[in-house]
Image: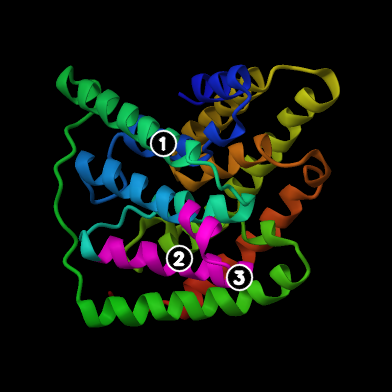
Amino acid sequence: MAFIMVFIAELSGETEIIFPEICALTIGAWVSEQQPWKTNKRRIFLLMSAAALFGVLVVRYVHIPLILQVCLCFGFTGFILTLCKTNFVPIISACILPVYLRTESWIYPISVSVMALIIIIAQWLMEKYHFRPVNNFVPCEFDIKKQIIKWSKLLIIFGIIALIPFQNHQIYFLAPPLIVMFTELSNTESPARKRPFNIVGLMTFSAFIGCLIRLLNIYFNFPLFICTAIACLILFVALDKMKLFFPPAGAILLIPMILDKSLIIKFPFEVLIGSIILCCCALLLFKNKP
């Protein structure tokens, strides 16, 4: 899926087609035996499409400081997740990424919608022919008051953490997949909370592999779609060895494929520091049951 996505992007010259979160979706919807989110196929399509469109609309029409644009997108995704009774947090990255990249093209939400559709069709075929268990949707039972408190707390904590990086134009200390990780770990029922060191290590490893393989494209002119395929294969082997199918790792792996080459060397170190800070905040500041 990632190979085809990047191949089409290179062939067409439309970089907006490259959507790193697609790797996270394939990990959750295709690779892991049990889908990690309480959602169904209709919600996957509608929520991904709405989040991507909202992010582009914010860039085009909401002219406020970058940190406020990101917080607006973060709050919007929290609202629609609660409204749709799901914990399908990858939409956070889909909404925030165009703000980071200053994407105004309608190609981005269209490509996200098309890829989400491909993901759910392939998942349906896998379930039909018994390649993976059927995903039975059980809506999340949210206490609205507690959800409002939780998302307000997430926004405030994120806003405080983001002040220094955004002020110094070092926004990838808080790359969109790290915000997804932060949200996931804030859920006290998430299995990922039991393995924080592994999560930080996996996110850093993914960023490092993505950057290392991207160097083949920068310095040796390897096609980007080949680099993407190699990076994904390495990550999938690592996930299998660790028995830790954490979708945000797939998204952070592909971020280097769309970064300016001047940012590649420092990106893994930014991810390491950002992961540690966000992981600690999620574990220490969110302890009450939702």
Q: Secondary structure at mark 2?
A: helix
Q: Amino acid at mark 2?
A: Phe
Q: Which residue is mark 2?
A: 74
Which amino acid type is shown beneath numbered disc 1?
Ile
Q: Residue at x 27, y 80 (%)?
A: 146
Q: Residues within 10 Å of mark 3 (few under 14, many from 20)?
A: some
* Labelled pair 3, 1 in contact (Cβ < 8 Å): no
Marked residue nearer the N-terminal end (3 or 1): 3
* Residue 216 image point, x, y percent: 78, 23
User: Does dot 3 land on a helix, a strand or a loop?
Assistant: helix
Return the residue at label 3. Answer: 67
In terms of image quadrants, where is residue 220? top right
Residue ID at (45%, 40%)? 24
Q: Residue at x 75, y 33 (%)?
A: 212
Name the residue: 63% across, 24% down: 13
Instruction: Please give the residue where the numbered disc 1 appears in the rendered image.
Output: 110
Location of residue 255 with respect to 199 vertically, above or below: above
The stretch of residues the image draws in magenta is 56-82
> As rendered, which of 118 and 66 lies closer to the eye?
66
Q: 199 or 225: nearer the eye?
A: 225
Q: Is residue 93 left or right of residue 167?
A: left
Mark nearer the N terminus (2 vs 3): 3
* Distance Cα–Cα, label 2 vs label 3: 10 Å
Image side of residue 136 versus residue 151, left or right: left
Q: Position of residue 101 (x, y in %)?
A: 63, 49
Depth check, front residue: 208 or 144: 144
Dot 1 falls on a residue whose secondary structure is helix
Q: Callout 2: few (<14), some (14-19), or many (20+) C-alpha neighbours within 10 Å?
A: many
